[in-house]
Image: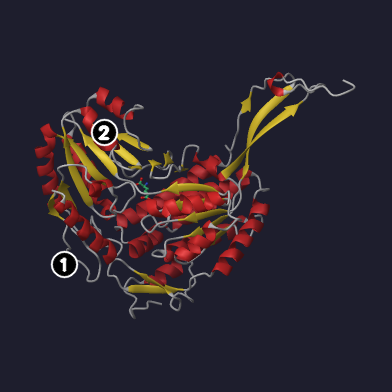
Amino acid sequence: MDTAGTDRFDLAALLGRLGVPGDGLAAGDLAVRSPIDGAEIARLPSHSTAEVDAAVARAAGAFAAWRAVPGPRRGELVRLLGEELRAAKDDLGRLVTIECGKIAEEGRGEVQEMIDICDFAVGLSRQLYGLTIASERPGHRMMEQWHPLGPVGVITAFNFPVAVWAWNAAIALACGDSVVWKPSEKTPLTALACQALFARAAARYGADAPDGLAQVIIGGPEAGAALVDHPGIALISATGSTRMGAAVGPRVLARHGKVLLELGGNNAMIVAPSADLQLALRAIVFSAVGTAGQRCTSLRRLIVHEEVADQLLAALKSAYDGISIGDPLDPATLVGPLIDWRAGDEMHRVLGVAAQEGGTVHGGGPVTQGVPDGGAYMRPAIVEMPAQTETVRTETFAPILYILKYSDFDQAIALHNGVPQGLASCIFTRDLKEAERFLAAAGSDCGIANVNIGPSGAEIGGAFGGEKATGGGRESGSDAWKAYMRRQTATVNYSDDLPLAQGIKFDIEGD
Ligand code: UN1
């Protein structure tokens, strides 16, 4: 099945264990490449618009049946999916590494994130509760109830090729919705593997899991657009760039659909003079170079107090020098390749612009020794910037960390919030007042704000998402499930009278 001729990753056996049928993986129009060496690993047929329509029709049928299944029974299917994921953790994690290039440890971590959200959704399936609200009318009861919403369209990015689907699918299924998933065209194999694991869970579950409950659409932007514009999709949950979100959002709203957007971040850390610098250093390195800087939560801006800037920068440079860059399947590697050379070239271009804007660039070039040929292996870069220029304000999906200095706390907050995006943020400080000011209304304007923790690597239990150009959506934990259900305010009159709200009198003849 390996279109390069040799099955260098033992992919056929891996896909076989995951339950992905071997036929049809080598003859399509969509070339799939491993970022490890840039060579082709599969060719999948893209779905046509007519096939997207057919999938949505199946999803509508599945929804009609699934919404009538009691919530806790729906949770049982998600529990079985979690079991399948536990059993397949190493295999699916390896496939994630082969297809998107993140290191093996992070590939497995991503599958763990799927297992965690399944566990969460199983509990949630017994907790889809609403409020009772004090009615102003005598003999009346007012309540809020939550009903399944409809087929959910999930559009995901290459960098978390499986976890973000699980955040959506586990919650949507528990909420009584069907799911149609359009993964990134760069990572369709992991999607087929998830689909196969879901099919295993559904086969164990029983007949009340209807056909078409979870489906995958393979293809590029046209397939995504067909889903976005389809009136049968009640909610589009889309993860990607701010540009993609600006295109998708209005199109869904124009057809009165619902939208949940997880778009770009430009995440910062403030390092205060009282910070534990050793702790900060570890958090910076993980969040700035982990996943090769390709998380939406990756650390991109370091806003450091001038008193500790030199010391921290020296420690950072030496930590960066020691980072092992190479084959992500090698357990000793901390930084794997970028997704492709387009991303590598873009990193190179952006560093050039940053230098023109007055930045001093450390690192950042391609790595050619000790790495597999063909992959976009780049040395992570640190860039000392004189100001928060347009380049700093723009998200580049690569391991570039801009350093800005500050002298007073208000200035640090102003720099921190002075970007279009608003996803993840953090401060390292031992000063309680600073920590609280960072978390207060006039502090960080982001959806995620941490104290003495880096911006990336959020747990599934909280709501995940951000403000401003990040799109405003929330998924995963907390009450993010409410986006996947429709809210109904219901009032019941158990009196013998018909009092009107607001005390309005509207007596008809004969009263
Ligand atoms: C993403 O990069 O799209 O908080 C998701 C994190 C992960 C999820 C990242 N739990 O870094």
Residue 328 in view (yes/no): no
Mark 2 residue type: Ala
**Quarter location, residue 107:** bottom left
Q: For the point 67% across and 27% down, which residue is it?
A: 142
Residue 111 placement (x, y as % from top left)? 40, 53
Residue 68 in view (yes/no): yes
Q: For the point 63% across and 27% down, which residue is it?
A: 132
Q: For the point 78% across and 24% down, which residue is it?
A: 494
Helix, strand or loop under label 2: helix
Q: Is residue 377 above or below residue 250?
A: below
* Tag 2 residue: 414
**Quarter location, residue 378:** bottom left
| Of residues 315 and 262, the one drawn nearer to the viewer in this rendering | 262
* Tag 1 residue: 368
Mark 1 residue type: Thr
Residue 151 placement (x, y as % from top left)? 59, 53
Helix, strand or loop under label 1: loop
Camera-nearest label, 1 or 2: 2
In the rendering, which numbered label is found on residue 87? none
The residues bearing labels 1 and 2 have C-alpha atoms spaced at a distance of 40 Å
Residue 495 placement (x, y as % from top left)? 79, 22
